[in-house]
Amino acid sequence: MSNRTLTFNIFRFDPYRPEVAPYMQSFSVEELDGMTVFVALNKIRETEDTAIKFDFVCRASICGSCAMLINGRPQLACKTLTRNLPKKITLMPLPVFKLIGDLSVDTGAWFRHLSLKTKSWIHTDKAFDPQVLEERMDNQTALDIYEAERCIECGCCIASCATANIMEDFWGAAGINRVARFMIDPRDGRSGKEYFEVIGSEQGAFGCMGLMACDDLCPMELPLQMQLAFVRRKMLGLGFKV
Amino acid sequence: MNSNNTHITDVLIIGAGLAGERVAIEVANHGLKSIILSLIPPRRSHSTAAQGGMQAALGNCAMGQGDSPDIHFQDTVKGSDWGCDQEVARLFCDTAPSAVRQMSHWGVPWNRVVAGKKRLSTGQVVNDDPEYDGLISARDFGGTAKWRTCFTADGTGHTLQYTMDSLVIKLGITMHDRMEAVRLIHDGDHCMGAIVRCLRTGELHTYLAKSTVLATGGYGRLYGASTNAIINEGSGMSLALETGIVPLGNMEAVQFHPTGMVPVWILITEGARGDGGYLLDKNRHRFMPDYEPGKKELASRDVVARRMMQHIRQGYGVDSAYGQHLWLDIRHLGEKHINTNLREIANICRSFAGIDPAKDLIPVRPTQHYSMGGVRTNIDGAAYGLKGLFACGEAACWDLHGFNRLGGNSLAETIVAGLIIGKKIAEYTSGAAQKYTYQIIKDHHANIDQKIKDLISGKDGQENVYALRDQMEQNLMEYVGIFRTAAELQKAVDNLKDIYYRSLKIGLRSDGSGANPELSFALRFPGMVRLALCIAYGALERTESRGSHYREDYPRRDDQNWLNRTLAYWPAGADLPELKYEPVKITEIQPDDRGYGEASVRS
């Protein structure tokens, strides 16, 4: 394996210390076999600058914590292998989301707000009865719901979205995909009209300019373009009915 | 102390994984207020990483026909090597089916039974009855007599957590994320809440509650090679142990998962073997049937992990730059199955090892995975020693798992225990009053404040917290692993004691201002070493082999002397835990042959 010396240029800023202007700091790291940006960043923190902030949890591309701009592209740092990158690597925090410090952004609060706005839970009047068998569901329907539910709320689609970058309240692909997940769920009792109220707006299905960077960059490879088409078609169908 | 940073509620829940959120929902349904604290956004909790599934005896799929809570109970007790509390196991197995249906009601897209004939990877043909079509299905997992593990592809933990969290949002339960509890507030009799450090600003907050619940997960990250998320540092157990009054149960019972992927130690789900995967050695020989003719790759995890290490020791391991390993082979399951039901692991293989499991073998070795031990509670989830303190999920020693947990029983535990214990917490809290005095809060606050000042000033020394962590990990990996001996365990205890003293002399490299990550870790670390000592010392003293605790110098289970549970206390100023033992509750099945493993007459 190559023994390259990598140079990481990392964005530094502490919003709680606004008197220190944002700057880029560079660190040298000896590349190791199979090294990921996760491994490199921890090495930097433990040996070079113990104050640097970034987020990792599962380090296995399951939890969605570690999205950042790696040489300009929103990606999960945990599964980005350095051998696929040039020697010079620039790391910036994701745009759109509130900066916590350095590479750490508040995707958690953003997605919680999204769940609230899209009312992302099963709407039902039925009470749960522990004595009764579960309602039956076609396995394919279950798989289709899971397909949309695989979103890990990493924020790559939002950070790469031109609309989300200029329009504060736009839900982006994550929001549209989220609504699609509930639309196909037979347990959710919301009517088409209720869904229209949720998503039939500029903030929802109609704000998208169709650039589709979300679809290219989703680390979970969710079919975001298809989901947008699905939701728009539903909304259109509803419009014609009215 | 800033009075703006004081929060008062009925129930304070520390940890927003499945167990913590399930408790929150239950207490909300009883009309009580709660605040959940989480180190991270809740949907990033380690619960989401559970791939394989959750056990509940529904008996819907063909290979699950005839299943019942009784059989689930037997499997669980055998799996635990008779170390579990049978009253707890019974309650758990009886409740699991309705808990899994409730999750379905709330939105989990469980895989469903598809009626009709199908050929399993073993060649066996099964027929799913149309009567069960569309009901919740199940897959095979280790140590179970029936197919009982309910699943959503290989993202079960993810869908459970997302559904649970959707309820938390719907119910308007207060969530404070990026907050870390650093000390429990108590007077030696009652727990009153916690001192909490904000991981956005570094400020200290005071949370006061009638009940406090530890739902902080396991301690996998004490080991250098663990499948666990990096936040799994046993923080709730540390908080409880630090009180000096609350004991930890069975800390020496550490589970190693047979298939951590080399060298990143990311989990390859048991579902891979459950769905028909094989373990191969360097000669591409499928060796498990040689050791375990009955259960083969699907004996309990402790047994499979030991058989793998035994096989490596006999010279059949595959050499690599990261030590010897074995192969997991799922190629024969076919591309379609791998890319749907095992898709997340296919992705993990591609991203982290550059291999395609539909074509390539996966390098695996047993890797630390689960903490059976934890904060010792009674069947109601109430911690020993402090009123108003509860624990739930992997953080607790309830004690469902004894000395070995079955795959699929941990996800199930979070939900079932959350439901049962949540109810008990609601009952307790409804009859409890806020009990605290200004002085007690001030004292606990001052304690942490002083620690932070000392770490920043370097008053106690200049030890490097990351270097000490490396040493702690190394000692646990080398001397407190799958095969254990008195000499090695003694070495671990001696070394860890030294590391513990040094951990009291940590000085920061950075200025420690704000939400400084080095300061966060330095505050946590001495507690982590105390946990490591509980594990190593408990293992040294337990002179028998039971479940995952395997002593080469005492290879047999010894029911005469050791059919008991270890309780580890940490008296103030001590450098070793004080160990006590309590009997294990046996209500239904007397200790017997497990039917697999080294001691079994049948294997």
Image (spheres, coloured by chain):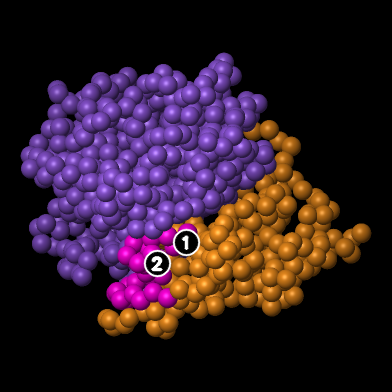
Q: Are marks 1 and 2 on the same chain?
A: yes
A165 and B345: which is toward the camera? A165
Colour of chain B as rendered: purple
What span is colored magenta in the figure?
A26-55
- Residue position for label 1: A54
Question: The numbered mark 1 sits on a residue in which chain?
Answer: A
Q: Position of residue B536 (x, y in %)?
A: 20, 40
Secondary structure found at label 2: helix
Q: Residue drawn 38% across and 50% down?
A: B456
Q: Position of residue A108 (x, y in %)?
A: 58, 54
Using the image, determine if residue B70 lies above or below residue A181.
Answer: above
Q: Is residue B244 visible?
A: yes
Q: Is residue A225 magenta?
A: no
A75 and B115: which is toward the camera? A75
Q: Position of residue B421 (x, y in %)?
A: 49, 27
- The amino acid on which the numbered mark 1 sits, given as a three-letter code, is Phe
Q: Residue drawn 30% across and 21% down?
A: B585
Q: Residue drawn 59% across and 75% down?
A: A216
- Residue position for label 2: A41
- The quarter of the displayed image where residue B350 is located: bottom left
Q: Residue drawn 42% across and 60% down?
A: A51
What crowding class fits label 1: few (fewer than 14 Cα within 10 Å), some (14-19), or many (20 or more)?
Answer: many
Q: Is residue A46 magenta?
A: yes
Q: Is residue B82 visible?
A: no
Output the letter for the chain in orange: A
The alpha-carbon separation of the residues under discs 1 and 2 comes to: 8 Å
Q: From the image, which quarter does the C terminus of chain B lie in?
A: top left
